[in-house]
Amino acid sequence: MSHKHDHHGHSHGHDHGHITMADSLNHAFVIGITLNLIFVAVEFIAGIVLDSVALMSDAGHNLSDVVSLALSMMAFRLAKLKPTSNYTYGCKKSTILVSLANACILLVAIGLIFYESFEKIRDPQPIEGGAIAWVAGIGIVINALTAWFFMRYRKRDLNVKGAYLHMVADTLVSVGVVVSGVIISYTGFYILDPIIGMAIAVVILFSTWGLLRDSIRLSLDGVPMGIDGDKVKDEMVAADPRVLEVHHLHIWALSTTENALTAHIVVDSMTGVDEIKHNIRHALKHLDIGHSTLEFELPGEKEHELCEDCR
């Protein structure tokens, strides 16, 4: 019976699923990094040759994506390291730190794009719109393909969500650059290039904001997005009729994919505590909380009197 519960509790990602997800993500990161690195070189050189701030700014953003993807892949590997006496949770939280670093990298890229765009508006130069459109067209294919690699797992991990959002934003940005390139080639409206550059920055800012907010929240041990503390408490009380109350509830993230909880559980009797604990943990797994430390107490007991009963 116990095995049945454990397996069902991990229905969101049992062992076979985790291996498949890890392998798929590893391939996605390697392919995404390789494709984007090649495209960054092509786009940046084209931007210099064609004197296009839209192309150069997009290349800069794509380079930040390459760095972000590399950091994310490194964090996934660090998260697999076994715990030590100094790092009792292992290096799982590196995934959170990397997602925060990715958001900061994007903010720097946004600042640089705005700076270059303003400079270009002050002194617009003739550019080759047709060539810009062709280069950006290649970007649409590469960014859309990379986004597709991450789409399946975007809701399971903040790092993957960050990678996915970057690629979707890049795809939209490349579409914008293609449109501006076509318009410029037919009208000679060169100032459209830096305007598109600033539009790119705004798109990136919107896609970055959620990543930055969630990363800061997890870095400060806030309750992870998607988890309702009140609902968790209600589910814990409902998990077993012998549970009277739940208090001193703390919920935080161990990594971008694992959540933890500690709580004091008031029960009517210490008889059958192991079964109550099992029922509560089973309920918590359905709420994406896989690590829980539960302290049991009787009604009216004071915390300092509970030492012998805290198991």
Image (spheres, rainbow, N blue to C red):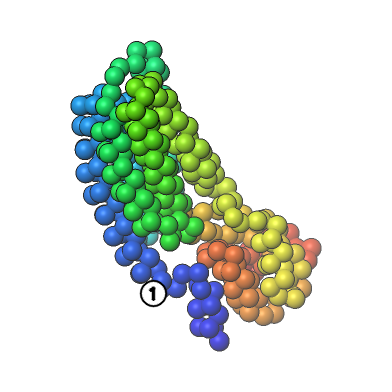
Residue 125's spot in the image, x, y percent? 30, 17
* Residue to which mark 1 is pinned: 16
Relative to 189, does residue 29 appear above or below in the rendering?
below
Quarter occupied by the N terminus: bottom right
Q: Residue at x 45, y 30 (%)?
A: 199
Relative to 249, does residue 266 appear above or below in the rendering?
below
Q: Residue at x 36, y 69 (%)?
A: 20
Q: Is residue 74 visible?
A: no
Quick check: 198 left or right of 241? left
Q: Quadrant of residue 263?
A: bottom right
Relative to 298, does residue 176 appear above or below in the rendering?
above
Q: Residue furthest front?
A: 186
Q: Residue at x 74, y 75 (%)?
A: 242
Q: Which type of secondary structure does the marked residue at label 1 adopt?
A: helix
Residue 304's spot in the image, x, y percent? 68, 58
Residue 249's spot in the image, x, y percent? 65, 56
Residue 287's spot in the image, x, y percent? 59, 65
Of 18 and 195, which appears nearest the observer?
A: 195
Quarter occupied by the C terminus: bottom right
| Kind of residue sitting beneath label 1 | His
Q: Residue furthest right?
A: 300
